[in-house]
Amino acid sequence: MRRKLAAGNWKMNGTAGALSELVELAKHVKPGDAETLICPPAPLLYLACEKLRGTAIAIGAQDCHIEASGAYTGDISAPMVADTGATYVILGHSERRDAHDETNADIAAKTRAAWGAGLTAIICIGESGADREEDKTLDVIAAQLAGSVPENASGQNSVIAYEPIWAIGTGKTPTLDQIVEVHDFIRARLNDRFGQETGDTIRLLYGGSVKSENAAEIFTAENVDGALVGGASLKAADFAPIIKALSRA
Ligand code: PEP
């Protein structure tokens, strides 16, 4: 049985005052609801963990370096993330693959670093609009899964987020059939590679313009175990209904 996961990615949004939204969100999340995670910008990680101590909301980072320490100005290592009290880290988000030229090999190395620090990696994959138009979606997904997800992945240490790039922040979403096709494909690939006993434990999140209006339909898919949510995770009033829809699914 995979526990549902509602993960919020705040991207580069929010200063300390925004943490009041987390405190508000915590009032809505009850025991038995879907697991809830917020990934704020790195400077807020420690404070977010302090403010949410004793609540049901987990905290994660949005990236980590492959090394534990060293001369990497501006970077943050996985042990540093773990030291804040955070338990997850998003890796390979398309905005990082694109703006920071992150390759599948980089993401696999970051994932191993995250595991080494005891963090659960949320590994993001997804096709561009051009890939989909050219009918290359499943080939792209297969290559990203093979290259970004290291050996020894399991439900304990990894979550996969399917985020079609053309759906992120655009208000466009794939049809339910398109989401089902990709999620079923990812599940089959994980089962082939890691064996069904392990593959079936790895949670698969859908990400890309999830809102309270479309969440319930997306969560009907058997292999959608939750969502990675950008814009609609910034305000408790927007994210709470998505968590509730997932908890009911
Ligand atoms: C994201 O950034 O991972 C994302 C899915 O963003 P949005 O929900 O805003 O499309």
Image (tube, helix red, strand yellow):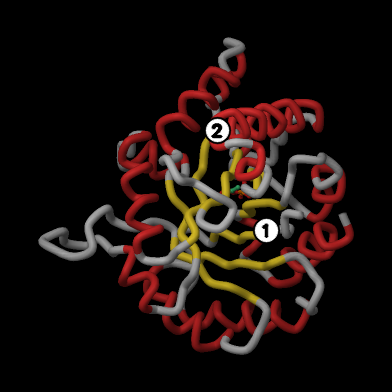
From the viewer's perspective, is residue 135 above or below residue 185? above
What residue type is disc 1 on?
Ala
The image position of residue 55, as x and y in percent, is: 66, 84
Q: Is 156 or 140 nearer to us in this picture?
A: 156
Mark 2, secondary structure of its residue: loop
How far, Cα to Cα, is label 2 from label 1?
Answer: 19 Å
Q: Residue at x 58, y 84 (%)?
A: 52
Assign the N terminus to one quadrant of the image. bottom right
From the viewer's perspective, is residue 8 above or below residue 175? below
The image position of residue 19, as x and y in percent, is: 55, 80
Q: Residue furthest left?
A: 71
**Image quadrant of residue 238?**
bottom right
What residue type is disc 2 on?
Gly
From the viewer's perspective, is residue 129 above or below residue 37? above
Q: Residue at x 87, y 54 (%)?
A: 249
**Image quadrant of residue 189?**
top right
Which circle marks residue 139 in the picture? none
Crowding at mark 2 (Cα within 10 Å: few <14, some 14-19, many 20+):
many
Image side of residue 10 versus residue 5, left or right: left
Mark 1, secondary structure of its residue: helix
Q: Is 96 or 4 nearer to us in this picture?
A: 4
Crowding at mark 1 (Cα within 10 Å: few <14, some 14-19, many 20+):
many
The image position of residue 221, as x and y in percent, is: 82, 40
Q: Which residue bears the numbered disc 1? A: 232
Q: Residue at x 56, y 14 (%)?
A: 136
Which circle marks residue 126 in the picture? 2
